[in-house]
Image (cartoon, helix red, strand yellow):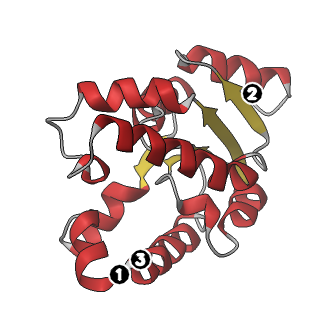
Amino acid sequence: MNLFLIGLPGSGKSTLGKELAQMLDLALVDTDGEIISTEGRTIETIFKESGEVYFRKAEQNLLHRLTEKNNQLISTGGGMPCFFDNIEVMNQKGIVVFIDVPPATIHKRLIAQRSENRPMLENKTDEEVLLFLQQKYEERFLYYSKAAIHVKGSDIRSTEILEELKKKGLY
């Protein structure tokens, strides 16, 4: 069984993933990190040099390779569930958890982390970042809402996700 965390960039998938993987004794896989490692270049560079279609295909290929194994917590890139049949594959091969943090909360987090390597912040004003997040939320909600578990809030804790999994008899 695999556990997938989906949601907008900055929603806390990586942080929550580390905690949950330890709590549930699962191997942790960060799909963006895997792609960076495999490609030997940043996601921003992949987008610039090879384009979004190439990147999305790399995500799809990675997802199919990952789902050949079990007992993993897979923290996905924000767009991964929204392309090809990825969300369906995730739902077939494991339990999908939508980390639903309001765009305004994510905006505050990202602005506070502006010095970190966040390509989506480059060359954008604070207001443009917020508009970008709101737009992505609206575009992706249809896919994100297909998750088996939907955890919503501004300060989601790994223990809340664990409780939701137990409530639904999934863990």
Dot 1: element: loop
Work out whether 79 lies above or below 58: above
- Residue at which label 2 appears: 165
- Residue at which label 1 appears: 51
Work out whether 104 lies above or below 124: above
Residue 9 position in % (x across, y down): 44, 44
Residue 89 position in % (x across, y down): 71, 66
Q: Residues within 10 Å of mark 2 (few under 14, many from 20)?
A: some
Kindly report which numbered mark, 2 or 1, lies closer to the viewer in this rendering: 1
Question: How many marks overall?
Answer: 3
Q: Residues within 10 Å of mark 1 (few under 14, many from 20)?
A: few
Q: CA distance from mark 2 to mark 1?
A: 37 Å
Q: Name the residue: 55% across, 20% down.
A: 158
Q: CA distance from mark 1 to mark 3?
A: 4 Å
| Residue 4 - label | none
Residues marked 1 and 3 touching at CB (< 8 Å): yes
| Picture quarter with the C terminus | top right
- Residue at which label 3 appears: 52
Dot 3: element: helix
153 lies left or right of 51: right
Q: Nearer the viewer, residue 89 or 105?
A: 105
